[in-house]
Amino acid sequence: MEKLEPFSFSKRFEGVPLIGSAFAGEHPGLIPLAFGFPYPDSFSIDELAESSVSALRTAGTEALQYSGGPGQKKVLEWIRERSRLRSIHVDTDHILITSGSNQGIDLAARTLTDPGDAVWVDAPVYFGALRAFYLAQTELTAFPVDDQGLRVDVVEEALIEAAAGKRAMPKFIYVLPNYHNPAGVTLSVERRKKLAELAYQYNFYIIEDDAYVELNFGGEFLPSIYSFGPERVIYMSTFSKIVAPGIRMAWVISDPEVLSRIKIVKTDGLTSVFVQEMISRFLEKVDFEAHLKPLVEGYRLRRDAMVNAIHEFFGDEVSFEKPEGGFFLWLTFPPETDTTKLLHEAVKAGVSFVDGKSFYLVDKPTNNLRLAFSFCDEKQIREAIQKLAEVYKKQKNAVC
Ligand SMILES: Cc1ncc(COP(=O)(O)O)c(C=O)c1O
């Protein structure tokens, strides 16, 4: 066989960071605070098994066909009803099932933009979305987040500049309103409303990624951005955090005209009709509120364990906003801290986290990190934070 020449792969990959699964297989014994996986006991295995068998036994010939069975309609109806809690009142023709929210983000981005178009995101930003926006070859600009979520006032100033021709007007702004990944914060109602108003005024879209909305630890449910601007918002949420990520089922809510374009971009044709059949039975079988309650409680206990351990082992060395839901806690260390070095030593000591730099485009601060409290139990969380604090103090003393 002749010697192979190097192959020239698509230039779209250049500079696109791969963060996601890269850490998943770290060494055994490591306490993983890196990735936002649901804790294993959160999966309703028995109910899902029964629902799978029932889907096959009672609708197998349809559920296994390209066209699918009645479950598709039932899932849409469930989403329509559930969405009312977010002040979203739409018919099922506004809803599209996708293979995870990550697919929804990707589809929406490619539907709204051409290569070179401007897209605005928050900083820090969910890196799964960043990957989709890089691959869509958009030009990204990031805007700061504070304890109330995205700084909509800073966004407005930039929009005024864009309207004056001083910078490109964004095609869309990507926003994570509830229990931000990674920052843990929630966008205030005033900012939601203002952002929707700006979308109408300056004619851009908002991609509202509401992956964690159901995991609310007791605060009030805020109205979605969609409810303030349905013609300019593409809303999405997912079954990943409330049933299981492995089923790869999520949804997009948008104007039917936008959805018709998204469906063209969605080249996989259909999201697993068998899984939809199974989930429709699962949702019929369980009392959803009763299913959700222990799940949310499980995450709340883990959040509390992490917050308490941070107070106990770090004292006031670090600062953070206590997340009112979701999976993540965002730690800020003194400015001289280098969390990349810290990660290196922490993994050796048996704890992982995600370095804060992974969530920035440019001007990457060196002193942040993201901890996931979603996967480990409370005992492991305490142990992990204790180890992390030891590593941090050792590193700090070595610098002094
Ligand atoms: C903010 C955010 N959006 C979307 C997703 C993707 O969810 P899905 O499993 O539905 O693709 C995640 C998962 O971690 C996430 O954190």
Image (cartoon, grey):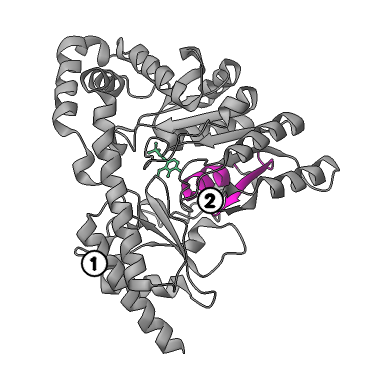
| Residue 134 or residue 389, whichever sits in front | 389
Q: Is mark 2 within 8 Å of ligand 1?
A: no
- In the rendering, which numbered label is found on residue 125? 2
Q: Where is residue 289 in the image (x, y as percent from the top left)?
A: 29, 27
**Residue named by callout 1:** 383
Q: What residue type is labelled 1?
A: Glu
Whether residue 352 sits left or right of residue 258 in the image: it is: left
From the viewer's perspective, is residue 353 above or below residue 328?
A: below
CB of mark 1 near ligand 1 (< 8 Å): no
The kind of secondary structure element at disc 2 is loop
Q: Quadrant of residue 331?
A: bottom left
On the rendered structure, is 327 left or right of 134? left
Q: What element carries label 1?
A: helix
Question: Magenta residues, as a range?
Answer: 113-136
Upstream in sequence: badge 2 or badge 1: 2
Amino acid on which the number 2 mark rests in the picture = Val
Where in the image, quadrant-wise, is ligand 1 located?
top left
The image position of residue 179, as x and y in percent, is 45, 45
From the top left corner, tell me how far across and down residue 129 is, in percent.
51, 44
For residue 134, above or below residue 17:
above
Residue closest to the eye, 34 or 140: 34
